[in-house]
Amino acid sequence: MTDIDLNALSLAELKQLEKNLAKAITSFEDCRKAEARAAAEAVAKEHGFSLGELAEMSPVQKRAAAAPKYRHPENPEITWSGRGRKPGWIAEALEAGKSLEDFAI
């Protein structure tokens, strides 16, 4: 590897070096991806499948959004499903002595 004194380079030279480095990184990543794809295709072929067939077999199943269980008293468009962190308006109301049942839909 070549040692470069970065402090001796001008701004234009540093920017050109940055561009060249970005191109080299992209090229390297593309080459590695192509190698990985070829290896995956070879393994799939050993088992009698194409990589495309295997990719189609396992669709990503997304989780359905949880139905809202609680509604903001002043703005009915603001809701909370009861999952995850409590929204600020729920936390404030609970601190003020209200219960979750007060906001139930």
Image (cartoon, rainbow, N blue to C red):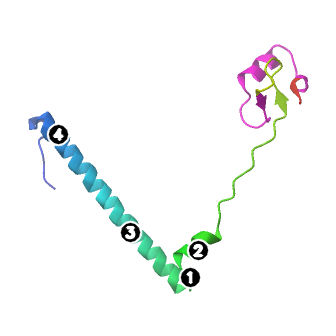
> Which numbered tag is attached to residue 34?
3
**Which residue is painted at 78% across and 20% down in the image?**
75
Are the residues at dot 2 and dot 1 in contact (C-beta closer than 8 Å)? yes
Is residue 100 inside the magenta stretch? Answer: yes
Q: Which residue is mark 4?
A: 14
User: Residue 51, how many percent across, how many down?
Assistant: 52, 75
Q: Is residue 96 above or below residue 29?
A: above
What's the magenta region?
79-102
Within 10 Å of the Cα at label 2, are there few (<14), some (14-19), or many (20+) other Cα atoms? few
**Which residue is painted at 87% across and 25% down in the image?**
103
Within 10 Å of the Cα at label 1, are there few (<14), some (14-19), or many (20+) other Cα atoms? few
User: Mark 1 is on which residue type?
Assistant: Phe
Q: Under tag 1, what secondary structure?
A: loop
Q: Which residue is mark 1?
A: 49
Q: For the residues marked 4 and 1, what is the alpha-carbon distance in whole angstroms?
A: 48 Å
**Which residue is painted at 17% across and 39% down in the image?**
14
Within 10 Å of the Cα at label 4, are there few (<14), some (14-19), or many (20+) other Cα atoms? some
Q: Under tag 2, what secondary structure?
A: helix
Q: Earlier in the sequence, mark 1 or mark 3?
A: 3
Q: Which residue is mark 2?
A: 54
Q: Earlier in the sequence, mark 2 or mark 3?
A: 3
